[in-house]
Amino acid sequence: MSTVKILVVDDQKSVLVALQLLLQDEFDEVITLSNPNCLLSTLENKAIDIVVLDMNFSAGVNTGNEGLYWLKKIMEYDPRLSVILLTAYGDVELAVKAIKMGAVDFVLKPWDNRKLMTTIQTAIQLRQSKQKIDRLEGEKQSLTQVLNQSKTQMIGRSKAMLHLNRIIQKVATTNVNVLILGENGTGKELIAREIHAQSARRDAALITVDMGAVSESLFESELFGHVKGAFTDAKSDKPGRFELASGGTLFLDEIGNLSLPMQAKLLSVLQTRQLIRLGDNQIREIDIRLVCATNKDLIQMVAEGEFREDLLYRINTIHIDVPPLRKRGEDIAVLAEFYLRKYAQKYGKPKLSFSSKTLDKLMQYDWPGNVRELQHTIEKAVILTDNNKLMADEFLFYQAPKGSGKYKASSLADMEKEMIALALEHHEGNLSRIANELGVTRPTLYNKLKKYDL
Ligand SMILES: Nc1ncnc2c1ncn2[C@@H]1O[C@H](COP(=O)(O)OP(=O)(O)OP(=O)(O)O)[C@@H](O)[C@H]1O
């Protein structure tokens, strides 16, 4: 708070003068009011931070009701305002009632100057904290909106995808735990995002944790949080992912990678819906919708004693199987078109299209890396091509088609290098033919040969 404005409301002129003298040296602006009827308009016009309010206004009446009446009005106007009540009568019951209604503190007349100052300083700190919370809440909401906006839409028109969409719609309206099963790159995370986006929790956050990337030693502090000093690096209190997801959805990716001890800890939180931060003793309630995903066969893992059966039952109230891309051929063409348009626009080649042979070739391929591989393949082709039509020979697949080999992840640069090396071998070093086949100019090819030391 850059400046602090204090409003003092009391019908005794002597009290107003005394408080004005006391407070004006310490605070930026002190406004006094002898008639509470102008209280609300003053709050509106002056952006007040702290109100020091008398409990009794009408002469001879000392029930405190007038003070409580105005306190209620102030709280209705802005519950973040800090109100300190002044009264000549030490009525504990009244104090409790006022504090329950939202007052910060209660000071008896005649007041002790030092004590009053301390009370006001505390009220200022409280006001600052409330403003900070409001700001953070606002930032959180805008971040959530940005995250929701940037989500990719789910593409596909195969029977399998239409069925998936129907299940997502039905499941999203409930709070049940969902387990999504499927090979790498089939769109499990996208489905988790879709469930969240269609649920009543959509305005809160979707928090993702990649269980394959969380080490045993960090598991508890990452998921359950810690308090300052819980371990050497715990410099401040920090909420875990469970708390951050409270009110929203927690997406635990690669759940099949959890060790048995971590599974036990997770199960206990899921059963009680309560957690304790590392180093703390306060029990915290959590309200999450849980979505998990894995490419592993959890039933097999249960049979082999690698996954707890009780945890499996806890996380898969509903399970969703996402078929691999090769089993939903119709989606290949739609997804390929979708990513072609996306990357053609991104790389400034808006006229790009596929030749019909190219589409056939893409539909024939096995796509062991599923949609992710298709996406990267199209992006790479869009970057490399100099044509307006993407030709079939601009797509070199490294695995034999249909039913062979395992997907091997590689960067675009690795794939480009490998592609040029294959073409060099195939055309026995004839650069014109290679450039022609790869759809690049000879100077571009020279540069790439130099870059990759081929
Ligand atoms: N139906 C779809 N429509 C559009 N894009 C999709 C679709 N399915 C997957 N994708 C895209 O493919 C990529 C991989 O998807 P995602 O990360 O959801 O897969 P995953 O199954 O969670 O993968 P992993 O098991 O490796 O974590 C993402 O860029 C995603 O946007």
Image: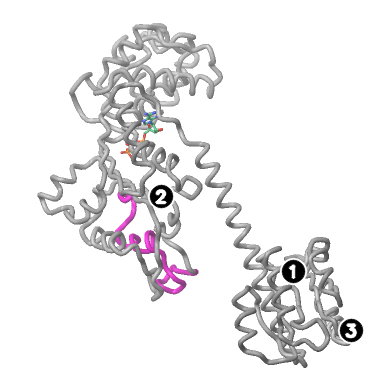
On screen, 177 above or below 273? above
Badge 3 marks a residue whose secondary structure is: helix
Which residue is situated farthest in the left direction here?
303
* Image side of residue 249 versus residue 86, left or right: left
Which quarter of the figure is the N terminus placed in?
A: bottom right
Query: What type is the residue that disc 2 sits on?
Result: Thr
Residue 379 falls within the magenta-colored stretch: no
First to last magenta residue range: 211-236
User: Does residue 221 show up magenta in the picture?
Assistant: yes
Q: Amino acid at mark 3?
A: Lys
**Residue 67 against residue 420 in the figure, above or below:** below
| Quadrant field for ligand 1 | top left
Q: Which residue is mark 3?
A: 13
Way the structure is coloured: one colour
Q: Amino acid under label 1?
A: Asp
Which mark identifies residue 49?
1
**Is the residue at mark 1 in contact range of ligand 1, meaning its CB lies under 8 Å from it?**
no
The span from disc 2 to disc 3 (Cα, nearest Å) is 57 Å
Q: Secondary structure at mark 1?
A: loop
Q: Establish if 412 lies above or below 173.
A: above
How many labels were placed on the picture?
3
Location of mark 2 (residue): 249
Instruction: Report the residue at 80% width, 81% height from top.
Output: 57
